[in-house]
Image (tube, rainbow, N blue to C red):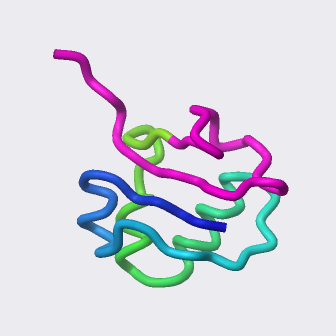
Amino acid sequence: MDVLYFAWVRERIGLPRERVETDARTVMDLVTQLRAREERYAMAFSDLTALRVAVDQQLTDFDASIEQAREVAFFPPMTGG
């Protein structure tokens, strides 16, 4: 699946997107696997309250299933203005 990173998440990880082979069943499972990769991932995912997630371009929660997903995106909360 494609994993996309936006704004400061992209800056901390150092990539805008990557292809990830995973057996994760939920977004949280994926986050756990990513955190274990390297320190930069652990830092990017250290405070999940500062992150939002979309699965196949639909906003969702970290307990959402990704078993049939093609894309997961992580980004900071959106603000108006």
Report if residue 15 lies within the magenta region.
no
Q: Residue at x 56, y 72 (%)?
A: 34
* Residue situated in front as seen by the camera: 11 or 28: 11
The quadrant of the picture occupied by the N terminus is bottom right
The quadrant of the picture occupied by the C terminus is top left
Residue 34 vs residue 51: left or right? right
Q: Main secondary structure of the magenta part?
A: loop
**Residue 64 image point, x, y percent:** 74, 41
Report if residue 61 lies within the magenta region.
yes
Q: Residue at x 53, y 43 (%)?
A: 53
Residue 77: quarter of image: top left
**Residue 43 image point, x, y percent:** 36, 66
**Residue 19 image point, x, y percent:** 57, 76
Residue 2 vs residue 26: left or right? left
Image height check: is 58 above or below 53? above
Q: How many marks?
A: 0
Image height check: is 72 above or below 76? below
* Residue situated in front as seen by the camera: 48 or 2: 2
Q: Residue at x 33, y 58 (%)?
A: 9
> Which stretch appears magenta?
53-81
Q: Residue at x 69, y 58 (%)?
A: 70
Of all residues shown, which one is farthest toward the left? 81
Residue 72: quarter of image: bottom right
Image height check: is 52 above or below 69? above
Of all residues shown, which one is farthest toward the bottom? 38
Image height check: is 44 above or below 58? below
